[in-house]
Image (cartoon, rainbow, N blue to C red):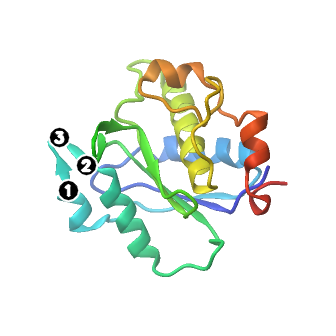
Amino acid sequence: MSTAPIEIVTPRKHPVPDRVLRTLAKRLATALTTSVSVTGPIDVGPAADEAEVGPQLSSNRIIDHLIARDGARDHPPRRWVVAVTNADLAAPERDFVFGEATVGGAWAVVSTARLQEDDDEDATLDRLMKETVHELGHIAGLDHCPRPKCVMHPSTSVLEIDRKQAAFCDRCNSRFPPASRT
C-alpha cells in the first residue's frame, strides 16, 4: 500500500519530542510505503490554543488551523498532514479523543496524552503508530471496522488500542482508494 506523502507537525505550545516524531515517521514510511517528513513545530493559532474544553484542547480547532494554514488544495491532496500533540483532546459530544481526521481530506491530529506508558516508551510509540495509522485511514476515506484487530476498529481505551494491530485488515486494505494503494 502507498499513500500520499505525509507531513508530521507538532504544535509549539503542546509539542511532542522530536525523537518520538522521527521514530513515528520512520515507522509510517515503512508501513505505508511513502515519504514522511517531520516539520515544525508550528503555531496552531489563537483559535486552537484558546479552544480549551476544560483542561483539553479542541481537536476540531487544531484541524481547522491545519486546513487554514494550507489554504486551498488540489483533490486529491498532494500530501497528508498529521499534527501530533501532547495535549489531551476533546471533540463535540465526546469526553476525549485519541485523534481526529478529516474523512477523505488531508488533515489529522493525534494526541499522546492518554497513550503514554510511564516507563515504556516502546508501548507509547506502538500506540501512537496505531492511532496515527487509524487517522490516516480516515483521511483515505475509511470508516470504522468491526474487526477488533484491525487498526480501523474504534478505540475508547488504551486496552483496545493495545489489542489492535498497526495494520489494516484485508477488508479495509481492499477498500483503500485506488490512488492510495499499490
| Residue 127 in picture, x, y percent from top left | 52, 30
> Quick check: 130 left or right of 2?
left
Residue pointed to by mark 3: 55
Disc 1 target residue: 51
Judging by the rendered image, the residue that carries numbered circle 2 is: 57
Q: Is residue 122 above or below residue 45?
A: above
The image shows residue 147 at horizontal and vertical percentages of 65, 26
Pick the residue in front: 159 or 30. Answer: 159
Which is more toward the observer, 19 or 158?
158
Residue at 57 percent of width and 32 percent of height: 153
Question: At numbered mark 2, what does the secondary structure look like: helix, strand or loop?
Answer: strand
Q: Nearer the viewer, residue 67 or 5?
A: 67
Q: Residue at x 65, y 32 (%)?
A: 166
Q: Earlier in the sequence, mark 1 or mark 2?
A: 1
State whether residue 156 is above or below residue 44.
above
Assess disc 3: are there few (<14), some (14-19) or many (≥20) residues with their C-alpha within 10 Å of its C-alpha.
few
Q: Residue at x 54, y 21 (%)?
A: 162
How many neighbours does mark 2 have within 10 angstroms: few (below 14), some (14-19), or many (20 or more)?
many
Tell me where residue 112 appears, x and y as whole percent.
40, 37
Contact, mark 1 vs mark 2 (Cβ under 8 Å):
yes
Per the model, the C-alpha gap separating discs 1 and 2 is 6 Å
The span from disc 3 to disc 1 (Cα, nearest Å) is 10 Å
Q: Quadrant of residue 130?
A: top right
Measuring from the top left, give residue 134's x and y in whole percent.
57, 41
SS at mark 1 in the image: loop
Q: Amino acid at mark 1?
A: Ala
The amino acid on which the numbered mark 2 sits, given as a three-letter code, is Leu
Quadrant placement of the C terminus: bottom right
